[in-house]
Every structure is written in C-alpha cells, then in structure tokens.
C-alpha cells in the first residue's frame, strides 16, 4: 500500500536542549572567532592579556553566582561544583594580581554584562537565568578546557594559575554535560519558554562577544 503524505512517519521533534544548541550556533561561532579570543588561543598575545580576560570574567561570575537559589528550582541550576568565582580570584592571585578590582576595573562591556545578569537574577523567571547559566558553564566544561591547554602551551601558565578550568568534583565532564542537557529536556518547558531560552542564550553569546571586542580595543 502506498503511504500518503499524512500517513508518513514524521521525524521526532528536537528536544529543547537540541533546539537550544542548534539555534545558537551562529552566535556561538561569532563569539569564539572574535579577534581577541582567537589571538589569545592561538598564542599571539601574552599571559598578561589572559590575566586581563580572567579579571573581567571574575566580575561576570560574581554576578552570576550571587543569585539566590529558589527552592522550587531544579538542583542542577545551583550545583556548587560549577561555581567559578572563587577559582577566578585564586588564579588572579597566582598570576600576580594583588587587588583584581583595583588593577583591572570592569570594562564597559563587562559592566553591561554584569548589569544584565543582575536584572536576570532579580527576576522570578527561571528561564533567563537558565540560559545564562547554560551558556557560561557548559562553555567552561567544553571550550574552556581548550583554553586551559592553550594557556599552558603558549604562555607557560601553571596548574595553579588555571584552576578556573578544573572541575575536580565532577568525575566525567562529558557525562555531566549530557546529564545537564537531559535536565533541560525534562523541565517540561513549553514552546514560548523554549523560544525565551534560545533568545536569552543568544544574548549571552552577544554579551561575551562584546566583552572580547572591548578587551581587544583596550589592549
């Protein structure tokens, strides 16, 4: 029997995490190919430039991790094993920065990023925070590992200067990332919430791209 168009099996709808990943490919690529971060990873800058970069990230993670947890929210959104602010401050000290706020004031792009994160934190809506959380921490668990390797290879950064990229309390990073995406898929987000998640993640990538541009301009 010939199948009609309506009787053919339709492909399964993409999961929310797959939609999130696929919908942000362009923004992700645009951010990671910015001149500053590309030059840093490829060894064309200096350890001092990496230090400047890390100091700006410290402001970002301070704002991200200052958000109060909500009892009704899923545990993976408040997993202390992901937190990076303390590691950033530790590494800055190891890199010779005695007072990171005084020596590396927040750039204009960093201030905009932090202000947006504070706005997200003050909102009772979990979805925008999830998007920011996803963009930052899954990036650290993925591309961040490459950055650590390149900082050591090109600039001689030591293990004590790169603890920001170590997740010692997580046994298997690949498995953790897979579980994180599964958590997103099991949240029961509706279509409007998924669209919101995608839009906010795109914004997160743009905020990162702006930060890289500012680091390049102020070098």
Image (spheres, rainbow, N blue to C red):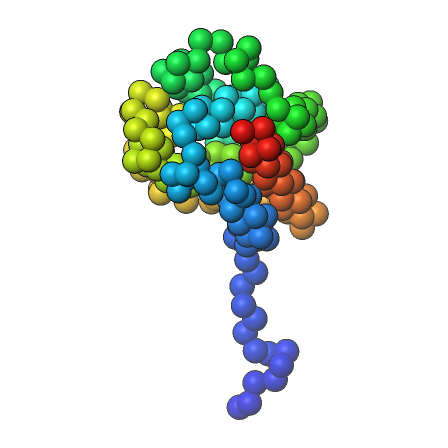
Residue 40 visible in this rendered orientation of the protein: yes
Q: Residue at x 30, y 28 (%)?
A: 156
Q: Position of residue 208 (x, y in %)?
A: 58, 36
Query: Is the residue 30 above or below the residue 75 in the image?
Result: below
Image coordinates of residue 162 in percent, x first then y, are: 35, 26
Nearest the camera: 32 or 174?
A: 32
Q: Nearer the viewer, residue 121 or 202?
A: 202
**Closest to the observer: 66 or 140?**
140
What's the residue at 54%, 68% (across, down)?
11
Residue 155 spot, x, y in % from top left: 34, 31
Rendered-image quadrant of the C terminus: top right
Residue drawn at x 31%, y 32% is: 152
Residue 83 showing in the rendered view: no
| Image quadrant where residue 94 sits | top left
**Observer-nearest of 69 and 4:** 69
Left or right, 77 with reference to 107: left
Q: Identify the residue at image location x=38%, y=18%.
A: 95
Return the x and y of residue 47 as percentages of the image width and height.
39, 27
Q: Count numbered badges in the picture.
A: 0
């Amino acid at each position: 029997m010939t199948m009609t168009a309506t009787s053919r099996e339709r492909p399964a709808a993409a999961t929310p995490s797959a939609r999130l990943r696929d919908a942000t490919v362009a923004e992700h690529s645009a951010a990671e190919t910015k001149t500053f971060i590309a030059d840093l990873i490829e060894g064309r800058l200096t350890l001092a430039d990496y230090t400047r970069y890390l100091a700006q990230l410290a402001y970002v993670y301070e704002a991200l991790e200052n958000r109060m947890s909500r009892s009704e929210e899923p545990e993976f959104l408040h997993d202390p094993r992901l937190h990076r602010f303390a590691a950033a401050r530790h590494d800055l000290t190891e890199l010779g920065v005695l007072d990171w706020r005084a020596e590396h004031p927040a750039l204009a792009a960093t201030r905009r990023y932090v202000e947006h994160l504070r706005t997200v934190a003050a909102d009772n809506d979990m979805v925008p925070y999830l998007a920011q959380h996803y963009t930052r921490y899954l990036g650290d668990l993925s591309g961040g590992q490459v950055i650590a390797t390149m900082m050591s290879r090109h600039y001689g950064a030591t293990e004590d200067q790169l603890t920001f990229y170590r997740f010692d309390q997580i046994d298997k990073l690949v498995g953790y990332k897979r579980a994180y995406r599964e958590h997103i898929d099991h949240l029961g987000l509706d279509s409007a919430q998924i669209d919101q998640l995608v839009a906010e993640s795109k914004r997160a990538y743009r905020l990162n791209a702006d930060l890289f541009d500012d680091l390049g301009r102020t070098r």
